[in-house]
Amino acid sequence: MAKIMAGSDDSAMTQEAGSETEAAADVARGTGISLWKQIVERIEADITEGRLAPGTRLPTEMELAERFGVNRHTLRRALSTLAEQGLIEATPGRGTFVKEPPIRYPIGPRTRFSEIVSGEGRAPSGRLVASQVEIASADIASALKLAPGAEVLRIEMLREADGVPITYGTHWYEATACRDLDLLVAATGSVTRALETLGLGDYRRLETRITARPADEKERRLLSLPMGRTVMVVEAVNGDARRRPIQFSRASFAADRVQLVIKS
């Protein structure tokens, strides 16, 4: 019997998925059904019947190939098909996982990534990708109601849920009002906590615009997306209690990992 084993968070340990159910049978040769298709059917059944739960890490390609008695080329074709079907997803550096349902992501007057992800029962995290002070472009100056030629601080952030990249965003702030904000973001991994340190934590959404397009090369790399995947681009202006703009952001969400919900 070829058994599908679920990888645990500890790389030194593995546990059998669906220990109370029968594992998938060996693939059969000479049946007229391609081996890779049989593997797809076995893993798909384990997922749909609950033996492999959402978020479960699959064994390595080598382990799966050995268990099914096939070469890695055949195994990779099966995994590629399962990924195209939206049943599994590979994340570089972490492995291949049974795909979790998209995060329900409300957009309203007070939108906070960490609170939303935590509310979905998943662990939020973030890291600073880059930052620099630059001259505001015309559209950014207009959004922040700054004079032409004003300096802004640009911060690029990658945010994840349970280690899976969800959104890559670029945020702009008036440089003089948010000095050292990038250092605070780097230390906390959170824009909200960094702004709270500057007394700007109670910011509110003033405007949101949403579009969709194919992910570009940088987005594919940071969000671990294959060629041809779509991102939802959310442009937003956030302001303080007096509705003065303090942040303009442009965030790219992996379209199949979130469900944007507009709250009124």
Image (cartoon, rainbow, N blue to C red):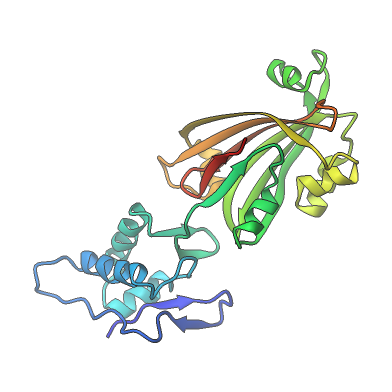
Tell me: residue 149, above or below residue 245.
above
Q: What residue is at 77 percent from the left and 23 percent from the top?
A: 144
The tally of labels here is 0
Let me know if residue 232 appears in the view. yes
Let me know if residue 183 appears in the view. no
x, y (%) of residue 195? 84, 42
Quarter of the image where the C terminus is located? top right
Answer with left or right where residue 231 lies relative to residue 2: right
Answer with left or right where residue 105 lies relative to residue 102: right
Furthest residue toward top: 148
x, y (%) of residue 8? 53, 76
Answer with left or right where residue 235 lies relative to residue 191: left
* Front position in the image: 97 or 122: 122
Q: What residue is at 80 percent from the left and 53 percent from the top?
A: 188
Tell me: residue 202, above or below residue 88.
above
x, y (%) of residue 136? 76, 21
Quarter of the image where the N terminus is located? bottom left
Answer with left or right where residue 24 lies relative to residue 94: left
| Image quadrant assignment for residue 203 | top right
| Image quadrant assignment for residue 41 | bottom left
Tell me: residue 249, above or below residue 97.
above
Q: What residue is at 54 percent from the left and 83 percent from the top?
A: 13
Tell me: residue 145, above or below residue 247.
above
Q: What residue is at 32 percent from the left and 69 percent from the top?
A: 43
x, y (%) of residue 196? 86, 45
* Front position in the image: 146 or 131: 146
* Front position in the image: 117 or 216: 117
